[in-house]
Amino acid sequence: MARAENEMQRSINPILSGEFVQQTLWSTQAEASEHLAPPDGQQPVPVLHLASAEEMSWVQVQVTLYHYRKTPVSLLSKPLAYIVLLHGRRIGCLIFGRPENTETAGWFSGDLQKKLDGSCRLWYWEVLCLLRIWFHEDVQVGGSWHRPGIVPGFFDRNGDWHSNLASTVIERALDAIVIDYLLAFPPCFPELPYQLAEVLSYCDTTQPRHRGTVYQQSGFHLVRENDAGLQTYARAVRPLTWGEDAYVQYFADRSLRSRRYRSRRQSERAARQLAFQTDTASFEAPRLAPSL
């Protein structure tokens, strides 16, 4: 895994030196004056594009350069990303992955027995984390695209316009990730719980304009806040449809990774069974010779 992390960093470094650096969404001033609103007053519709392995490098560059954390997402979290398109252009991205911690008291645990005995609500593999959200500065407050007809939004009772681009994108992403993630990383043991139940995310309130508003508008609830001002939000996600679940099980049955893990577990069980039988045989009581 360390090798994979190093390869990812090497693939990003040339890009950080100047290539793919964030540019304005407008190519020319004439283009900036074009009316991009959909016909008949319809709301602009952002499109989610599931990032390929090659496109993941572009995503990692954006969050490394422009997200406040200034770091790419670790491959250890098994990241999966969506690129957000609006009017045919890339305006942002979202990255999902597994939580870094495998246990949060009373919430989720990597030990399935703790869920079964009621010590926590969820198994670790039922939880996903929204690790990064990034949008181009042109679609944020003060940007050239931040206006009615260009990005989705609404007018309040006072006639003031507000963008709901982020909450719209997050809502669409949460609906899609429940199936996309399990197809990208099929469960190794389909007989155990694998459907996603909740998505969590973090909000650093020490950062400017970070108040958790986008999470609240997207249906997340505040779980906790630590002394450093880091808030943890969570939201339940929809279950798989019957067809989606069948599709996931189909992939799980044929995935080379899943088959490798199942084979390894079967070998370990066979080895333990053999060791148990050997130990049992060595402790058998000696037979008494028949008395004359």
Image (cartoon, rainbow, N blue to C red):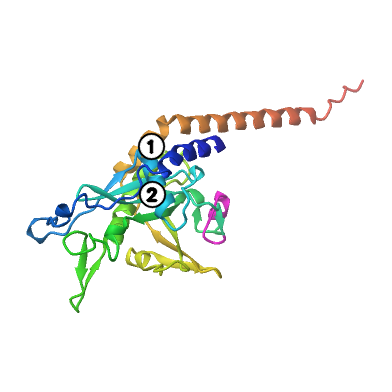
Tell me the kind of residue under disc 2: Gln
- Residue drawn at (53%, 29%) of the image: 263
Q: Name the residue that disc number 2 marks.
A: 62
Which segment is the magenta one? 105-117
Of 25 and 220, the residue lying toward us: 25
Residue 236 in which image quadrant? bottom left
Disc 1 secondary structure class? helix
Residue 166 in which image quadrant? bottom left
Of 86 and 268, the residue lying toward us: 86
Locate residue 75, reporting x and y percent.
49, 42
Figure label count: 2
Q: Nearer the viewer, mark 2 or mark 1?
A: 2
- 242 left or right of 150 in image: right
Locate residue 141, reporting x and y percent.
29, 65
Whether 81 is drawn above or below 104: the answer is above
Which residue appears farthest toward the left when viewing the image? Answer: 40
Gap between marks 2 and 1, in whole Å? 15 Å
Of 243 and 230, the residue lying toward us: 230
Tell me the kind of residue under disc 1: Ala
Mark 2, residues whose alpha carbon is within 10 Å: few (<14), some, or many (≥20)? many
Would residue 272 be seen by someone viewing this image from the given angle? yes
Of 124 and 83, the residue lying toward us: 83
Q: Name the residue that disc number 1 marks.
A: 53
Q: Tell me, yes or no, whether the two marked residues, 2 and 1, touch with CB atoms within 8 Å.
A: no
- Residue drawn at (42%, 43%) of the image: 17
